[in-house]
Amino acid sequence: MPDRLKITDERTGLQYEAPIKDETIRAIDLRQIKTGEKDFGLLSYDPAFLNTASCRSAITYIDGDAGILRYRGFAIDELAERCSFLEVAWLLLNGELPTEQELTVWQSQVKRHTSSWLHGGSSTIARADSNSRRMWASRRKMRPL
């Protein structure tokens, strides 16, 4: 199968080629198609974002028409239904779901750090209009920046 797309501009009769990689052509490759020297070049327009790839990812897969949304091979709806917040956090940080032992250790670490944070400076209560930098500085017994 050829790895180039041949395009004929019927306005000018000129032919162009665009490389095909991963079953796509780059929109910037259309810029070479012009009607004259002062022409900016052809642009692509996809108002509903139905046939546009914004990036190539080895981590996520999205097919909106088929209702598929995956992260590292796991269906997002299954992660939401079957995994705890900490299991998903582990997945985001480490690229895989934790084993039972890893999850137990992770839960303990998060609980210990959360507990010490909550009880170590609970006298500082943030108001909606408070300056977060000053709040953190007082929480850490530091001077504000």
Image (cartoon, rainbow, N blue to C red):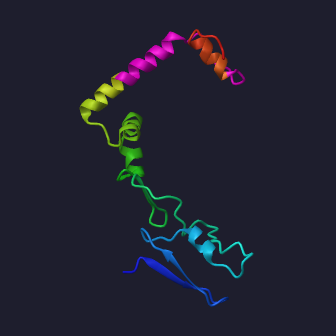
**Quadrant location of the N terminus in the rendered image:** bottom left
The magenta-colored residue range is 109-131
Of all residues shown, which one is farthest toward the front?
37
The residue lying furthest to the right in this view is 38
Residue 42: quadrant of the picture = bottom right
The answer to whether residue 40 is left or right of residue 24 is right
136 vs 45: above or below: above
Residue 8 position, x and y percent, is 57, 87
The residue nearer to you, when weighing 76 against 58, is: 58
At a point 72% along the width and 78% down the height, the residue shown is 37
Q: Quadrant of residue 81?
A: top left
Give the quadrant of residue 84.
Answer: top left
- Can residue 140 be seen here? The reply is yes
Answer with left or right where residue 68 lies relative to residue 137: left
The answer to whether 81 appears left or right of 105 in the picture is: right
In the rendered image of this protein, does residue 73 appear above or below residue 19? above
Q: Is residue 47 magenta?
A: no
Q: Quadrant of the C terminus?
A: top right
| Horizontal arrangement in the rendering, residue 125 relative to residue 83 (left or right) | right
What is the x, y in percent for residue 7?
55, 83
Q: Position of residue 121 (x, y in %)?
A: 54, 11
Front residue (pair 133, 1):
1
Residue 69 x, y percent position in the rendering: 44, 56
Q: Nearer the viewer, residue 49 or 126?
A: 49
